[in-house]
Image: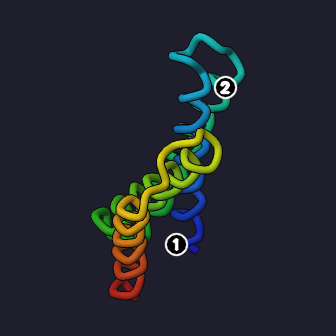
Amino acid sequence: MAWVILVVAGLLEIVWAIALKQSDGFARLWPSVIGVAAALLSFVLLTVALRHLPAGTGYAVWVGVGAVGVAVAGMILLGECASVGRMVFLAVIVTGIVGLRLVDG
């Protein structure tokens, strides 16, 4: 269950990063509210997951899910570059996340 909670926390990291981008430096109310709320919930869920997972593994997976998710969301929603090189290195991060899950048992 800790792994599911950790992945949800990582998915919320995507939400807060995109919302804060849309908030225009906290100038827009609702994206700011969504961003801060998602960040707080993400941190809470990360904390819950870390009760049962090693800190290094949990944090690395949380950051990895968020980083890959935000990069992909940026390409899809914000028109950011989707070069082959970028996709290769995102795949490397995903490989690391899966590897951490496999070695954690």
| Crowding at mark 1 (Cα within 10 Å: few <14, some 14-19, many 20+) | some
The color scheme shown is rainbow
Is residue 21 in view from this perspective?
yes
- Image x and y of residue 89, in percent: 34, 65
Residue at 47% x, 60% y is: 65
- Image x and y of residue 68, in percent: 46, 58
Q: Amino acid at mark 1?
A: Trp
Count of marks, rendered view: 2
- Image x and y of residue 1, in percent: 58, 74
**Tag 2, which secondary structure?**
helix
Residue at 35% x, 59% y is: 59
Residue at 43% x, 57% y is: 83
- Image x and y of residue 93, in percent: 36, 67
Quadrant for the C terminus, please. bottom left
Left or right of 81? Residue 4 is right
Q: Which label sits on residue 3?
A: 1
Left or right of 96? Residue 6 is right
Residue 22 lies in quadrant? top right
Residue 36 lies in quadrant? top right
Check disc 2 and report the residue beneath it. Answer: 31
Q: Is residue 96 above or below residue 8?
A: below
| Crowding at mark 2 (Cα within 10 Å: few <14, some 14-19, many 20+) | many
Q: Is residue 59 above or below residue 52?
A: above
Q: Residue furthest top?
A: 27
Is residue 47 in view from this perspective?
no
Q: Residue furthest front?
A: 83
